[in-house]
C-alpha cells in the first residue's frame, strides 16, 4: 500500500496533521512517484536522558551536535518568564503573525511556543533571547546560528491537544503530533494514529516532497525505524511517548544516539512503542 509524502501543511497552523494527512493518504498521488522506500532494520534505540521542566535551564546541556536530539514538551500556560517579559523577546514579524492568528487560543499558543523556543536557544548560545536570530520558513520550522562558532541548529514545533512539542537538532528534523478527532472513523485505531504520526514527521522533515512509501513500513511495532527514501536519502524516525490516545514521532536526517527530553516523566521510556 504505497503512500506519497506530498502533504501540504498550511503556513500558519501546524496542528496535529490528523485530518489533512488522512485526506492525502487517500487522495494524493505524485505525478511521477519515486522508487519505493525501504526499511533499514538496524535502527537502534538512542540513550535517553530525562530532565525536569523547570525555569532554570541546565547548564550542562549544550547545543546539540551530530546524533543528539533535544525534545521539549510543555503546556501552553507554561512559560520560563512572566508573560510581559516573554512578549518583549518576540521579533516584529512574530508579533505580526501573532496578531493575524484567527483566535486568541491559537495566538496564545503561537506566542508561548516562540517565547520558549527563544529562551531555549538563548541558553544554548549564551545570548539574550531577543538577540536570537530565528530563520523562519513560516511552517514552524526554524533555524538558528550560533553567534560565536557559527554552528547551525534546526528547530521544529508541533502542537497536539494541550501540548506544545519542540525538537532541536543539528540536522534537518520534522515533528508530528496526532490527536484523534472525536467521532473520527478513518484509521481511528491507535495503530492508525501512530502510523499517521510517523508519516507526518517525514512529511514535515522533507518539506512535503513526494516520495513513495509502503504503509507496512510505517506500521512496525518498533519505536525506532530508519528508511531509505530514494533520492531523499536515509531518514530516522523515533516514536515519542505521549499520554492517552495521542501519538507523536520525530524524523531526522541522521541517526539519533542520544535524546535529552524535557517535560516527560522519567518513567516513560523512549524507544518503546506506546500502542
Image (cartoon, rainbow, N blue to C red):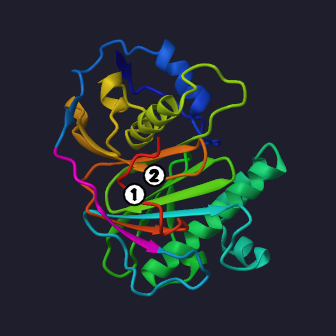
Instruction: Give the secondary structure at mark 2.
Output: strand
Mark 1 packing: few (<14 Cα in 10 Å), some, or many (20+)? many
Q: Any magenta on residue 8?
A: no
Picture quadrant where residue 4 is located: top left
The residue that disc 2 covers is 240
Residue at the farthest right position: 104
At x 70%, y 74%, the residue is: 86
Which residues lie in the magenta part? 42-50
Contact flag, marks 1 and 2 (Cβ < 8 Å): yes
- Could you tell me how far apart the alpha carbons at marks 1 and 2 are, in whole angstroms? 6 Å
**Which quadrant of the rendered structure holds the N terminus?**
top left
At x 62%, y 81%, the residue is: 55
Q: In the depicted view, which residue is nearer to us: 155 or 262?
A: 262
Is there any visible trace of residue 159 in the rendered image? yes
Is there any visible trace of residue 96 in the rendered image? no
Mark 1 or mark 2: which comes first in sequence?
2
Q: Position of residue 163 (x, y in %)?
A: 64, 55
* 135 horizontally vs 30: left or right: right
Q: Any magenta on residue 47?
A: yes
Instruction: Give the secondary structure at mark 1.
Output: loop
Q: Position of residue 107 (x, y in %)?
A: 76, 53
Q: In the displayed structure, would residue 101 be above or below residue 47?
A: above
Q: In the displayed structure, would residue 87 be above or below residue 13?
A: below
Q: In the depicted view, which residue is nearer to us: 114 or 56?
A: 56
Q: In the depicted view, which residue is nearer to us: 84 or 147?
A: 84
Mark 2 packing: few (<14 Cα in 10 Å), some, or many (20+)? many
The residue that disc 1 covers is 270
Q: Position of residue 143 (x, y in %)?
A: 44, 60
Picture quadrant where residue 85 is located: bottom right
Amino acid at each position: 500500500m504505497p503512500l506519497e509524502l506530498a502533504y501540504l501543511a498550511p503556513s500558519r497552523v501546524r496542528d496535529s496533521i490528523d485530518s489533512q494527512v488522512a485526506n492525502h493518504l487517500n487522495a494524493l498521488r505524485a505525478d511521477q512517484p519515486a522508487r519505493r522506500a525501504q526499511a533499514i532494520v538496524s535502527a537502534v534505540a538512542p540513550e535517553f536522558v530525562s530532565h525536569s521542566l523547570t525555569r532554570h535551564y541546565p547548564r550542562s546541556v549544550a547545543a546539540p551536535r551530530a546524533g543528539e536530539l533535544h525534545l521539549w514538551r510543555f503546556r501552553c500556560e507554561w512559560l520560563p518568564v512572566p508573560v510581559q517579559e516573554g512578549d518583549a523577546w518576540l521579533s516584529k514579524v512574530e508579533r505580526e503573525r501573532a496578531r493575524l492568528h484567527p483566535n486568541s487560543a491559537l495566538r496564545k499558543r503561537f506566542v508561548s511556543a516562540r517565547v520558549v523556543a527563544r529562551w531555549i536557544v538563548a541558553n544554548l548560545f549564551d545570548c539574550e533571547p531577543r538577540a536570537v536570530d530565528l530563520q523562519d520558513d513560516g511552517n514552524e520550522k526554524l533555524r538558528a546560528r550560533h553567534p560565536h562558532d557559527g554552528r547551525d541548529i534546526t528547530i521544529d514545533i508541533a502542537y497536539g491537544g494541550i501540548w506544545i512539542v519542540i525538537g532541536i537538532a543539528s540536522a534537518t528534523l520534522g515533528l508530528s503530533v496526532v490527536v484523534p478527532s472525536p467521532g473520527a472513523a478513518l484509521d481511528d485505531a491507535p495503530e492508525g494514529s501512530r502510523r499517521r504520526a510517523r508519516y507526518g514527521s517525514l512529511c514535515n522533515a522533507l518539506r512535503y516532497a513526494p516520495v513513495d512509501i509502503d504503509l507496512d513500513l510505517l506500521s512496525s511495532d518498533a519505536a525506532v525505524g530508519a528508511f531509505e527514501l530514494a533520492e531523499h536519502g536515509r531518514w530516522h524516525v523515533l516514536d515519542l511517548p505521549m499520554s492517552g490516545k495521542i501519538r507523536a514521532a520525530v524524523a531526522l536526517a541522521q541517526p539519533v544516539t542520544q535524546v535529552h527530553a524535557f517535560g516527560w516523566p522519567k518513567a516513560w521510556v523512549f524507544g518503546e512503542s506506546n500502542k
